[in-house]
């Protein structure tokens, strides 16, 4: 973390968040999901609770105080993000409904036979999380490599924000939702994974993605080798193109480490343009020829 970036004084809350905040928040969200019934509705409610807790922490102990939004601006962004998150959930369900019958013959005699369904559902959920994010890693990297895919996916909108906070995890162009829903649906259908496992894995991925964008000092020793930390993902959002082409795994940094795209540097600024884009800029970005 560059010494030039302003930070607020150390506190017990900051110290706890830094060392163990990510695993505690993830376990708390999963526990709440189980307590609420471990069904589809519980996914949204438990994730909403995490949105509230992380938003409060970003207000109390932000890593970069200068990037802390006003409460009104955060409220507008969160409401927009919730609409996009709900749409993403619907798309994911539609994809899975369509893909499961189509992939049933393959899942039954091919990949499905390899899936370790004898393991506890929680272990299967972690495996599905890693597999789905591995597919997302490939798709995400392709969006950055090929200009046509970058434009049609609208991914540039997600990269355009200058002050990164947790609610940016779901702020993107609506076109990108059609891409974001693919990896989990394909992985679940291809291996014929049980619905409860898919739901648990969805909670895990959605929660880690939220934390990866958070304006918090989270870097849990050991876990940072597998799970994406905010510092990892902030570099991927860097305004410097050379820094941005790294750390493609939004939730499982393990894939970047395996495929040689991991970069441990810290990014001082995020975004694509010198000035923050307007709402019209966001809407029109996929239809412009220039990538940056």
Image (tube, helix red, strand yellow):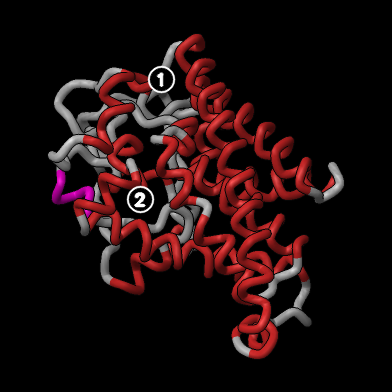
Q: Name the residue located 50 percent from the left edge and 12 percent from the top edge.
A: 71
Q: Is residue 201 above or below residue 113?
A: above
- Residue 17 appears in which quarter of the rendering? top right
Note whether residue 159 is visible: yes
Q: Identify the residue at horizontal 35%, vertical 27% (top origin).
A: 64
Mark number displayed over residue 241: none
Relative to 72, does residue 87 appear above or below in the rendering? Answer: below
In the image, residue 47 lies in the stretch drawn in magenta? no
The residue pinned by badge 2 equals: 232
Viewer-side residue, 57 vs 135:
135
Q: Nearer the viewer, residue 168 or 3?
A: 168
Residue 283, percent from left and from top: 33, 27
Residue 269 x/y as whole percent: 23, 33
Left or right placement of residue 227 versus residue 37 in this view: left
Q: Secondary structure at mark 2?
A: helix
- Residue range corresponding to the magenta coloring: 241-245
The alpha-carbon separation of the residues under discs 1 and 2 comes to 19 Å
The dot on residue 68 is 1
The secondary structure type at the circle numbered 1 is: loop
The residue sitting at 62% across, 44% down in the picture is 89
Marks 1 & 2, CB-CB < 8 Å contact: no
Q: Position of residue 263 (x, y in %)?
A: 26, 58
Please tell me which residue is depicted at 75% across the width and 62% down the height of the picture: 195
Majority SS type along the magenta span: helix
Q: Is residue 216 visible?
A: no
Q: Position of residue 1 (x, y in %)?
A: 28, 41
Q: Nearer the viewer, residue 3 or 79?
A: 79
Decide which of tag 1 and tag 2 comes sooner along the chain.
1
């Amino acid at each position: 973390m560059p010494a030039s970036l302003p930070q607020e004084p150390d506190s017990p809350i900051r110290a706890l968040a830094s060392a163990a905040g990510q695993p505690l928040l993830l376990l708390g969200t999963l526990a709440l999901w189980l307590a609420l019934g471990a069904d589809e509705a519980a996914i949204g409610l438990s994730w909403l609770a995490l949105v509230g807790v992380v938003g409060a922490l970003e207000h109390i102990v932000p890593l970069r105080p200068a990037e802390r939004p006003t409460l009104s601006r955060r409220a507008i962004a969160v409401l927009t993000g919730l609409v996009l998150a709900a749409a993403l959930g619907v798309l994911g369900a539609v994809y899975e409904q369509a893909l499961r019958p189509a992939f049933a013959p393959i899942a039954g005699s091919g990949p499905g036979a390899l899936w370790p369904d004898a393991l506890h559902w929680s272990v299967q959920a972690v495996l599905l999380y890693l597999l789905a994010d591995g597919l997302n890693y490939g798709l995400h990297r392709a969006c950055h490599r090929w200009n046509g895919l970058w434009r049609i996916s609208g991914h540039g909108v997600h990269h355009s924000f200058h002050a990164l906070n947790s609610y940016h995890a779901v702020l993107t162009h609506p076109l990108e939702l059609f891409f974001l829903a693919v990896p989990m649906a394909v992985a679940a259908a291809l291996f014929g994974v049980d619905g409860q496992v898919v739901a648990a894995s969805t909670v895990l991925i959605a929660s880690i993605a939220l934390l990866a964008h958070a304006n918090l000092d989270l870097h849990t020793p050991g876990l940072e080798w597998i799970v994406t930390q905010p510092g990892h993902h902030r570099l991927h959002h860097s305004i410097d193109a050379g820094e941005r082409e790294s750390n493609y795994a939004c939730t499982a940094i393990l894939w970047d480490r395996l495929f040689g795209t991991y970069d441990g540097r810290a990014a001082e600024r995020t975004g694509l343009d010198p000035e923050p884009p307007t709402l019209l800029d966001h809407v029109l970005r996929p239809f412009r020829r220039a990538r940056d």
